[in-house]
Amino acid sequence: MFMQAKITQTADPKREPGGQECALPEATQEGRSGRYTVRALTPEQKKLFKMPKGAGMAFRWEQTLRYRGFGFTVRSHIEEPYRPCWVEGVGDGRALAFGECPGRFDISAKRYLLNSRDLNADLGCLREQGVTDIVCALPDTELETELHIKGYFAKVIEHGFMLWRFVIREDSDSVPAPDQADELRSLVQGVTERLKSGSVVLVHCRNGEGRSATLAGCLMKSFGFSAGHIVEQFTRLKGEDCPKKAVQRDYLHKFSEAVPQS
């Protein structure tokens, strides 16, 4: 299912010659197609796309429509309930998982997706799957400004989860910084103890393929798995290289040196 954006020429002198201005996407009346449903954006959601040029997601949305394509699939918690990647070998195979950010509202330009998820629905789905602990790898600014989630941490706690935080910024490396070694060691030790006591843990970042997979891999190494085994398993589960970046996969190989155990 996709939402079609209307492309119109603009005479705005502030834009480059021949530039195009993109109207907001509107839903067609086709109803369902496959597992997705066409729907219009709410007035509140539309406001998010009227931010000034350069304001994170709104700017990327505009650029994507102008230069890369026009059809987008609406992906929500209704057609696609939250399903993380469950790793094998920890607990009974349903003890440790990694995935995308619950409740996200953003654009995945690479896959032409408009993610329009509901935080309460995603957290409720995770509770139904037995998740007890959530490890968030995202900084506040990414959660609030780029994913448009307000009150994320309060909601997680309100739903009864134990919340863990370890911030990894989505920059050129997207791996723990050298000065985070003590913090990462503490996180791995604490979450590992929870896993061994029967807790069920979700690690999430934004897309569920880079930073969250890296942290989940660090946890698996504490159970004795080799980096090669972890990368092979994660890649098989995702159907593509995982963790996403080569530097993240290399980090797992060097994890014991980067974060020596006390």
Image: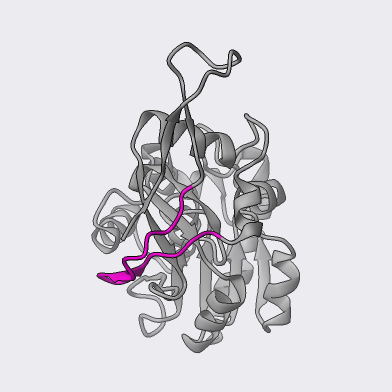
| Residue 196 spot, x, y in % from top left | 52, 81
Q: Quadrant of residue 18?
A: top left
| Residue 131 spot, x, y in % from top left | 53, 81
Residue in the picture at 67% in, 47% down = 145
Nearer to us in this view, 41 or 115: 41
Q: Quadrant of residue 225?
A: bottom left
Q: Assess whether residue 26 is covered by the magenta stretch.
A: yes
- State the extent of the magenta-drawn residues as a range: 25-41
Nearer to us in this view, 83 or 167: 83
Q: Assess whether residue 153 is covered by the magenta stretch.
A: no
Q: Can residue 262 be seen in this view?
A: no
User: 83 above or below 231?
Assistant: below
User: 203 above or below 168?
Assistant: below
Q: Can residue 71 be seen in this view?
A: yes
User: 180 above or below 117?
Assistant: above
Quadrant where the C terminus is found in the figure:
bottom right
Q: In which quarter of the image is residue 66?
A: top left
Nearer to us in this view, 174 or 91: 174
68 displayed left or right of 201: left
44 displayed left or right of 92: right
